[in-house]
Image (cartoon, rainbow, N blue to C red):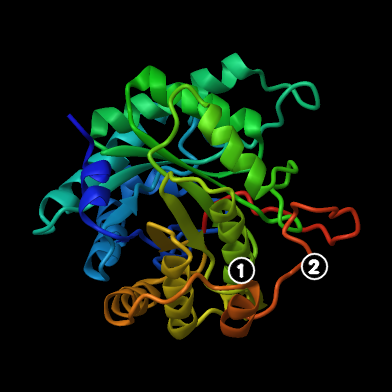
């Protein structure tokens, strides 16, 4: 039997995913440094509100509040023994919202990076990473997610370990990487390298692509890089709502609903099948994106000039597929926001 996401993709040209997790929860009072996953059990009403916000805005897919729900991340809060519980509950809350939506909505179990560096530069082994991801995957499966959603990954070793864990759990999956360092991931992966890696996996994802990163312009350039490889696998784009700015003591993303609507249409026209937002993307952005996707006719595949004209300039001169030795480097944020 095929999974819910594959069935939905077979009947639709595009699907809309959700927006930010962290930004929305911070607006509900989440404190900096507080693990959002704890709210699955202590403030489930807020997590229902998070999920409902995406569904009401038109999302066909939403991600569970489990991005940092692996043992390596939860250990920082002495909660490494709660992996199964926090992931199961986060998934159960999502299942509850999706099953009462009145239409098909896919619950995707968010799986973020471990935050550890792999051997030989670091101490994380492949076997350890597979075990960590497998534990989280089993919790999400137990809670009833339709697919696993591996996201914001920088290292190919970590992507492969998460894919292996999905296979061990017997779960379909999607996987995105964050291209935030002059068009590459922090660990040097280009869009072309990711597209090639995906096809070599023994259990390739339903869909793959990019999330987070810098801004919508850079993410769209990465998407064009995927498309130029000729891949026939569905593509995912989950770009940030503009660029983060520090304002009145908190981080604010400067992308307007109108800008995100332009981004959504450009992504669709570039051939992306699953379109959503990441950091800073609120329900008002999602509503504008959904309306634009439904009402604006499909156009030709955008050029880099089209993208910069509609979404603003790029953060680096290259997309990472050429020589990027002189391009500026950026720090990667640790949490999908």
Q: Where's residue 247, x and y in %?
A: 64, 80
Q: Which residue is mark 1?
A: 215
Q: Residue 317: which disc?
A: 2
Quarter of the figure that contains the N terminus: top left
Residue name at image x 28 percent, y 81 percent: 295
Tell us which disc is closer to us: 1 or 2.
Answer: 2
Q: Are marks 1 and 2 in contact (CB under 8 Å)?
A: no
Q: Secondary structure at mark 2?
A: loop
Q: Quadrant of residue 315?
A: bottom right
Q: Is residue 120 left or right of residue 209?
A: right
Callout 2 crowding tier (Cα within 10 Å): few <14, some 14–19, many ≥20: few
Residue name at image x 62 percent, y 55 percent: 225
In this view, the residue in front, 209 or 109, is: 209
Callout 1 crowding tier (Cα within 10 Å): few <14, some 14–19, many ≥20: many
Q: Quadrant of residue 329?
A: bottom right
Q: Where's residue 171, x and y in %?
A: 33, 28
247 vs 44: above or below = below
**Number of numbered discs visible in the structure rendering:** 2
Residue name at image x 61 percent, y 68 percent: 215
- Distance Cα–Cα, label 1 vs label 2: 14 Å
144 vs 303: above or below = above
238 vs 99: above or below = below
Residue name at image x 79 percent, y 21 percent: 120
Which residue appears farthest toward the top when viewing the image? Answer: 127
Q: Secondary structure at mark 1?
A: loop
Q: Where's residue 48, x and y in %?
A: 25, 56
Q: Quadrant of residue 90?
A: top left
Q: Where's residue 87, x and y in %?
A: 35, 35
In this view, the residue in front, 242 or 271, is: 271
In this view, the residue in front, 3 or 77, is: 3
């Amino acid at each position: 039997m095929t999974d819910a996401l594959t069935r939905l993709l077979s009947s639709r040209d595009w699907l809309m995913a959700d927006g930010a997790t962290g930004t929305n929860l911070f607006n509900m009072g989440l404190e900096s440094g507080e693990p959002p996953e704890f709210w699955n059990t202590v403030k489930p009403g807020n997590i229902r509100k998070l999920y409902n916000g995406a569904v009401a805005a038109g999302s066909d897919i939403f991600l569970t509040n489990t991005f940092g729900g692996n043992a390596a991340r939860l250990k920082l809060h002495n909660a490494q023994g709660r992996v199964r519980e926090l992931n199961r509950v986060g998934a159960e809350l999502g299942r509850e919202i999706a099953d009462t939506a009145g239409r098909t909505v896919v619950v995707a179990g968010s799986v973020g990076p471990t935050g550890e560096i792999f051997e030989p530069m670091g101490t994380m082994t492949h076997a350890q990473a597979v075990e960590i991801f497998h534990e989280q995957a089993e919790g999400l499966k137990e809670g009833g997610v339709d697919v696993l959603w591996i996201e914001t990954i920088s290292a190919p070793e970590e992507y492969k370990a998460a894919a292996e864990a999905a296979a061990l759990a017997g779960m379909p999956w999607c996987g995105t990487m964050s291209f935030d360092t002059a068009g590459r991931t922090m660990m040097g992966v280009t869009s072309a390298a990711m597209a090639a890696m995906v096809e070599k996996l023994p259990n390739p994802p339903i869909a793959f692509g990019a999330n987070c990163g810098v801004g919508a312009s850079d993410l769209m350039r990465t998407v064009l890089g995927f498309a130029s490889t000729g891949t026939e696998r569905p593509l995912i784009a989950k770009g940030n709502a503009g660029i983060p700015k520090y304002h009145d003591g908190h981080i604010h993303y400067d992308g307007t609903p109108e800008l995100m609507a332009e981004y959504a249409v450009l992504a669709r026209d570039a051939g992306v099948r699953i379109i959503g937002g990441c950091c800073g993307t609120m329900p008002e952005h999602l509503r504008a994106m959904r309306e634009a996707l439904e009402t604006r006719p499909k156009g030709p595949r955008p050029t880099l000039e089209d993208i910069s004209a509609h979404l603003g300039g790029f953060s680096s001169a290259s997309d990472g597929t050429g020589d990027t030795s002189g391009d500026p480097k950026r720090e990667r944020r640790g949490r999908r926001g």
